[in-house]
Image (cartoon, helix red, strand yellow):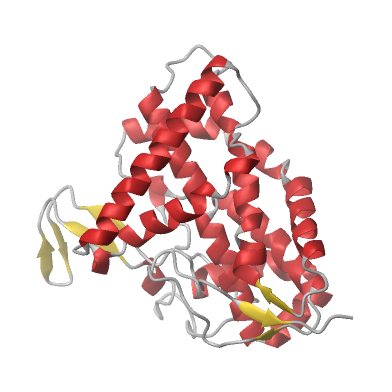
Amino acid sequence: TRLDPPKHDWLRHQVMTNFNPELISGLRPRIEEVARELLDTDAQRAQLDIVDDFAYPLPVTIICEVLGVPREDVALFHTWADQLILANDPSKSTNQEIMQQAKSARAEIRHYMGKLIDRLQQTPGPGLISAMLHPQTQEKQMTKEELVGISILLLLAGHVTTVNLIANSMLTLLRYPEHFERLRREPSIVANLVEEVLRYEPPIQFVRRTTLTEVPIAGVTIPKGAPIYLMLAAGNRDPLRFDDPDRFDPERPNIEHLGFGQGIHYCVGAPLARLETQIALPELARRLQEPRLVKDPPPYRESPSPHGPQHLLVSLHNR
């Protein structure tokens, strides 16, 4: 996300050659299986944390399997991800403790991924990292440094956004129980419902960019080389684009939101995030009996982007 063409285009092509629609669509049975297993485990609970018990373990399990990260190492990434995300919060940029934790987390995750790549270089295995290490074509390969960076990006982006998308979706549905009940009756509405959540309550609220030239806008000239924050969430509620933008409407037509960014940096993991959420929400609606929010608003993550509840406790009426 911080590279420009042509390097950006080449690296993106290397990823998309393997992380393609065929691979993602083929994950459906496994995603359904993991979702069922997680809810089977929690079937008799009177209370469920949608985040810790479901929204986090589902996508992190899938992305680790996709990449070829050993399952026993999955727990390592939770703390690293939280520390790196918090450091992206502009309001924390002067907090030396947070910046140091993020620096340590970045070093630790790079060290881990480098060792994993070394093992897969010697002994190929299943997963996307091994496939990128041992391509079937003879074109130029990524360096180890590039592969480490791409693997970390896929690992973090491949679950962090989806955790918050599932949690934000459930929070919104529990605030509008008529839509939750309709989803239970008509699971086919889930595709448009997910798009409306991505507009109404997107996990990624803003992205950081650097201007390559002077940019005149609204009577102000932003100088070349300036860091800017593009508020995607504000664009998603632009009244010039959307009628009644502050209303949650899963039947809204033509939902062209900015939930996954735009242009050449459009999220490569968007199809996987959509698929996981489109599987997760009907399964939650089918399995959870009379869920009620324990606390509204729930406790939110410190960082504003990704945006979502840190915990989402619901009480259940079990049969």
Image quarter of residue 285: bottom right
Q: Is residue 241 above or below residue 33?
A: below
Q: Position of residue 281 (x, y in %)?
A: 71, 67
Task: Name the side, left or right, on which 55 lies relative to 90.
Answer: right
Pick whichever, 260 or 291, lies toward us. Answer: 291
**Quadrant of res 248:** bottom right
User: Of 25 and 158, which appears nearest the observer?
Assistant: 158
Which residue lies most toward the right here? 319
Task: Locate the N terminus and report the quarter of the image it occupies.
Answer: top left
Q: Total label count?
A: 0
Q: Residue at (41%, 81%) from the top-left corner?
A: 239
Q: Position of residue 94 (x, y in %)?
A: 18, 63
- What residue appears at the point 82 percent right and 63 percent down from the top-left corner? 40
Residue 10 can be seen in this image: no
Q: Is residue 307 visible?
A: yes
Q: Which quarter shows the C terminus?
A: bottom right
Residue 65 picture location, percent across and down? 65, 40
Nearest the viewer among 261 and 203 is 203
Q: Position of residue 91 (x, y in %)?
A: 25, 69
Left or right, residue 274 beside residue 183: left
Q: Residue at x 44, y 19 (%)?
A: 141
Instruction: Name the side, left or right, on which 311 lies relative to 213.
Output: right
Q: Residue at x 81, y 71 (%)?
A: 287
**In the rendered view, would you say 282 is above or below 9?**
below
Residue 213 left/right relative to 188: left
Image height of 195 relative to 171, above or below: above
